[in-house]
Amino acid sequence: METFETKLAEATVPESCTLLGAIALVVNSAGETLYHHTSGHQSLDPDSPPLNQNSTFALASAGKFITHIAALQLVEQGLVTLDGPIEKYLPELSSLPLISRDAVGEPCKLHPLTLNKITLRHLLLHTSGLSSPDVSLIREYLADDSLTKPTFPEDAHYIVKNFSIPLVFEPGEGFAYGWSIHWTQLLVGRLGGDFLKYIQENVFDRVGMTSSTYMPRENEEVWERRMRMVERAGNGLVPADDATQGLVCSVEDVGRIMMDLISPAPKLLRDSGLVEMLFKGQLPGGSTPLMDLRSDQENYKFCAGPCMPGGGLPPAVNWTAAGLVVEDGTLELTGMPPGTVTWQGMPNVVWAVNRDKGIAMLFVTQLIPVGDETAVEIGATFMKEAWRTFG
C-alpha cells in the first residue's frame, strides 16, 4: 500500500492541504480488519486533532444501500412483495404523470401512465421512472409555471411534498438514478412503523453499529467526531459543514455492515434470493435499462473510471439492489474484479464488496463535489493497491 500512503500523506500535509484527510479500510468475511489507514485532520482548525479509526463521516448516496436492505427485510417478513404495485402502500405514486416531449425544442407534455405500475423492484433498481432535477425534462417541468404541479394536504409527509415529480419513462422501461430512494425510505417508514426506529433496531443494532445516525446534529457524540466537510475555493479548502446531513457513521460501523454483507451467515438478510439481489446484476442483457445505465458513465466514474480513450465501449457493469456491479473484466481505474459491488457518495466516499472473494473496502474523505480530481486519484490508487494486496 506504499504508493497510496505516500500520495495521501503528500495531499494531507497541513501546509499544502489539497485534501483535508482520508481514511481507508479493508475487512474480510471472517470479521477481521485487514487494513486501516488514516492521514490528515478532523477539521481545518490549526489545533484540529488527527483523524482516527473512530472518526465519523457523512455517506450521502454511498449509504442508500442501507435503506434498500431495510426494504428487502420487509419482503423477507412478508409485509410487501417485490413485484406487486407499490401504490397500495405509497398511493401518492399512482397520481404521478409521465413527462415527455415530441422533439427537441418542443414544450414538455404531461400524460398518464399506460403500461406498468411502479413496484418495489423498480424503486430498488432505479427503473421506476423517477429521476431528479438533474434531468433536463424535470428541470424544465419545475421551471414551467404552465405545467400543473401537484398539491398536498398540509399534513402530508415531507417526502410526498418534496419528491413528487413526473416520471421520465414508464416503470421498468429505463434506468434513472435519482429519487426512487426517498420513496423507498417512506415505504420502510410506513410498513416498519417509523423509519429511524426501524433502521436502528433492524440494521444498526443487529450488526453492532453504535456510532451511526440519520440525525447527526442531534447526536453530540457522533457529531463531535466527524471529519468536517470542506470544498475547494481557489487553491485552498474552506468549510462546508452545512453539507453534513443525513446518514453519518463511524468508519468502524461501515466496516461492520460490509462484513455482514459478505459473511457466509449474514444477520441482516437470511433469504438467499434476496441476498442475491444485492450482488447479482438485475438489469436484463440488451435491455433499455441496462443500456441507460452503461451510457450514464458520468454518474459512476469514481467507481468504474471514464470510458476508454477513442470512444471505446463502456465498462461491463450492471445494477444490483445495492449498487453498481462489475460483470466482466477488471476495472482499469480501481482494479475492481468481476463480482465486485460498489457505489459512491457526494463527499467522495466509495465502498466496494466482493462476496466471492470475501473482501470489502472503504475510502472516505469529506470533500465536495463528487469527482474531485485529487480525491478520485487517491481513492482509486487505494482501491487498486488493496485489490492487488488483499483480493
Image: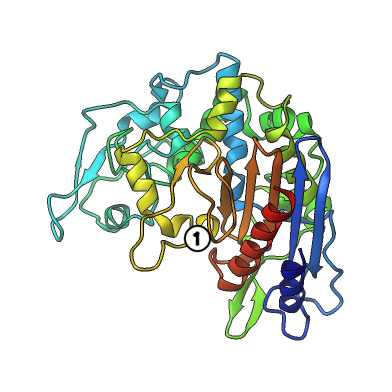
Q: How did the renderer colour the structure?
A: rainbow
Image quadrant containing the N terminus? bottom right
106 and 122: which is toward the camera: 122
Residue 169 in which image quadrant = top left
Q: Is residue 372 above or below residue 132?
A: below
Lateral position of residue 290 relative to residue 216, left or right:
left
343 and 194: which is toward the camera: 343
Lateral position of residue 329 relative to residue 310, left or right:
right
Q: How many marks?
A: 1
On the image, the x and y values in percent for residue 128 come to 37, 36
Q: Is residue 301 above or below residue 92?
A: below
Q: Is disc 1 placed on a helix, strand or loop? A: loop
Label 1: few (<14), some (14–19) or many (≥20) C-alpha neighbours in 10 Å? some
On the image, the x and y values in percent for residue 8 come to 73, 71
* Amino acid type, label 1: Gly
On the image, the x and y values in percent for residue 370 come to 54, 63
Lateral position of residue 120 relative to residue 375, left or right:
left
Q: Is residue 335 visible?
A: yes
181 and 160: which is toward the camera: 181
Lateral position of residue 4 relative to residue 155, left or right:
right
372 and 155: which is toward the camera: 372
Residue drawn at (50%, 40%), measured in percent from left and top?
Answer: 182
User: Badge 1 is on which residue?
Assistant: 305
Residue drawn at (29%, 59%), measured in percent from left and top?
Answer: 143
Residue 335 in which image quadrant = bottom right
Q: Is residue 250 visible?
A: no
Q: Is residue 250 above or below residue 3?
A: above
On the image, the x and y values in percent for residue 241 come to 67, 65
